[in-house]
Image (tube, grey):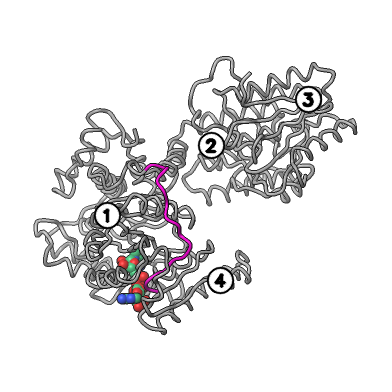
Amino acid sequence: MSDIVQYQLQGHVGVITLNNPPVNALSVGKGLLQGILDFIKAGDHDPAVRVFLLIGGGKNFSGGADITEFGKPAVPGMATLRDLCSYMETVSKPIVAAVAGPTMGGGLELALTAHYRCCAPGAQIALPEVKLGILPGAGGTQRLPRLIGVAPALDMIVGGEPVSSERALELGIVDELVTGDLRAGAIAYAKRVAAGGRPVRRASALVAAVDGDAAAFFAAARQRVAKEWRGYPAPLECLACVEASVTMPFDKGLIFERERFTYLVATNESKALRHVFFAERAAAKVKDVPDSTPMREIRSAAVLGAGTMGGGIAMNFVNVGIPVKVLELSQEAIDKGFGIIRKNYAATVAKGRLSQAAMDQRMALLTGVTSYDELKHADIIVEAVFEEMGVKQEVFRKLDAVAKPGAILATNTSTLDIDVIAAVTSRPQDVIGLHFFSPANVMKLLEIVRGAKTAPDVIATSMKLARTIKKVGVLVGVCDGFVGNRMVHAYFREAGLLLEEGALPQQVDRVMEAFGFAMGPFRVSDLAGLDIGWAIRKRQAATRDPQQRYSKVGDLICERGRFGQKTGAGYYRYEAGDRKPIPDPEIDALIVQASKDVGIERRDIGEQEILDRCLYQLVNTGAKIVEEGIAQRASDVDIVYVYGYGFPRYRGGPMMCADLTGLDKVHARVAEFHAQHGDDWKPAALLERLAAEGGTFNG
Ligand code: NAD
């Protein structure tokens, strides 16, 4: 028997300990489940055993299935979770599970198959399978509704969110909370179960019922779920399984659950979601910066600029208890910036998601300053001043003069060359880009931009900092727009060209929203404001390649003073106080005229062409980024897009989406567009090679 399950008889309690750190993943291959089954089988025949206790060896019960085993063939001689659960259904002695820490997915399904559950405080209890595009496939959808009622079970299974120990007790997921030492408390609880002569109490034998008309209840729920989870099959399948717990006997319900699970595992949506799960973990690894790299300590921070970005960046630090000095040009600018931060926190307090005391604590960690001298003790300084090279260089010269040795000097630039900024300091090894996304206190992505001379420990510390401030950090290299903005630029540009050729903004947006983006490119542009891009384009006009196609539609819209939502009009018009975009005949006419002016005969552009041209610009640009080494791996590009640009997670990011389509097909389409539209569509060498080899971006 392997060490990952241990057995000990404590009085008449057969204690089975799961011992598979770090989270007691229910590994089939390593024999964890078979081990539990064998001990239960042996104990069931042992008169000395009156009750079983299943308990985790570390801080938690079990985090669930070992997801690296997904889709792999069964291991001969090794029980699966379903085998174990169906064996537990036949056991004649009560089985108690000690729920603690993250008790998720298969871990919770195992606990639900036990007959009684005690629970440590501070547990996180969930069936999060839906987030990987699947459903609890070991009876969870059949047992939970029988145990706690249909409505709360539906919420947990469709939403996948964790509940606390206290809530689990209230719901009836667990029977008793155990304070103090869990092992001792759980053994005592198991003894009480045995002493009370309590029967085996199988969730499978209970009845799942709905108050009132079940068919109407599920019809309403189906409508709600379909709307909320547009385009994504797992939540509806979860719902169908919960419905089966009401309409089918337990055994039939299990078979139904298995069928729906098998179907979901094979869907592209589930493959994509599992890809994102692993990609996020892979992104934390830097190929040439080993985990053992020593880190610099970050106990205090400074932020330069209290504008749109600086304020949000400062919030990230104080949210996790790191004090921040915010340097501005004047006291008025500080007051203005801090006023916005205060308003932001107050809104969260008003929604009940933050206490007033916590808000006060955070505000107290912010200090506004106007003198560089105040920055000399900061462990990290993040610059978020105007996007102009001269201004940035001036700021970095001053920082170089005052910052303490070893301080990390970061810039939040969106477009400027980090190496040129670093070059004005005497310590380019300490300079790095920390590219936050707007709103910086909300958006999860942090592009960490490594300069040519950035030191490994500065990279390692920045990657760790991303986790500390609850961001997803992705390491990227220097190029215009880094990963995210370089790609979005190609995508939005293509969308602009589609307008000139025959499409309208509402049509392009509709296609991209049907694909799964929360907003299409023109709605995003109106939200972000059109004037900034216009200013950049005007600056670039002199150096623009005259051979490259250029759509003037965006400029013409700005020339009419339409800068998007902030002026009540952009690609769409907006009613006062309302963010709903309304297609505007004035813009339709402007676009038609723009086509005429450049001699393009407008044509009907089909939805597939709109989608392919927008999406494959992302993919082809992403491939160039990977082949140039700007991103470490294709999956990093996916993470940037999912966390920074609202790419639908269930499509896995642009590169995974292309993999799932087939790179031969993607390449053929890119080559077709290349022939039609010229060099903006030149296929990336990486795409060409992988398509020829039958490979994928994500290996
Ligand atoms: P902003 O105009 O809202 O804020 C800039 C602030 O910097 C102003 O409050 C200004 O008073 C202050 N400032 C200017 N020069 C300064 C100096 N020498 N010392 C101290 N403070 C100074 O601009 P923003 O949108 O917050 O952008 C700041 C930086 O962040 C830019 O580099 C920008 O490219 C980048 N960025 C912006 C976004 C975005 O969506 N707005 C996203 C990512 C990155």
Which residue in the protein does label 2 denote?
A: 134
Quarter of the rendered structure image containing ligand 1: bottom left
The kind of residue tagged 1 is: Gly
Assess disc 4: are there few (<14), some (14-19) or many (≥20) residues with their C-alpha within 10 Å of its C-alpha: few
Assess disc 3: are there few (<14), some (14-19) or many (≥20) residues with their C-alpha within 10 Å of its C-alpha: some
| Residue occupying the point 36% across, 76% down | 372
Percent across and percent down for residue 248 are 69, 31
Proximity of marks 3 and 4: CB atoms separated by less than 8 Å: no
Tell me the magenta residue range: 290-306
Q: From where the camera sits, is residue 583 visible?
A: no
Image quadrant where one finds the C terminus = top left
Q: Nearer the viewer, mark 1 or mark 4?
A: 1
The circle on residue 451 is 1
Upstream in sequence: badge 1 or badge 3? 3
Upstream in sequence: badge 3 or badge 4? 3
Residue 293 magenta-drawn? Answer: yes
Q: Is residue 115 above or below residue 579?
A: above
Percent across and percent down for residue 206 are 78, 34
Predominant SS along the magenta part: loop
Q: Mark 2 and mark 4: span between their CA atoms?
A: 35 Å
Q: Which of the 4 image quarters holds residue 655?
A: top left
| Residue occupying the point 34% across, 46% down | 637
Which residue in the protein does label 3 denote?
A: 9
Image quadrant where one finds the N terminus = top right
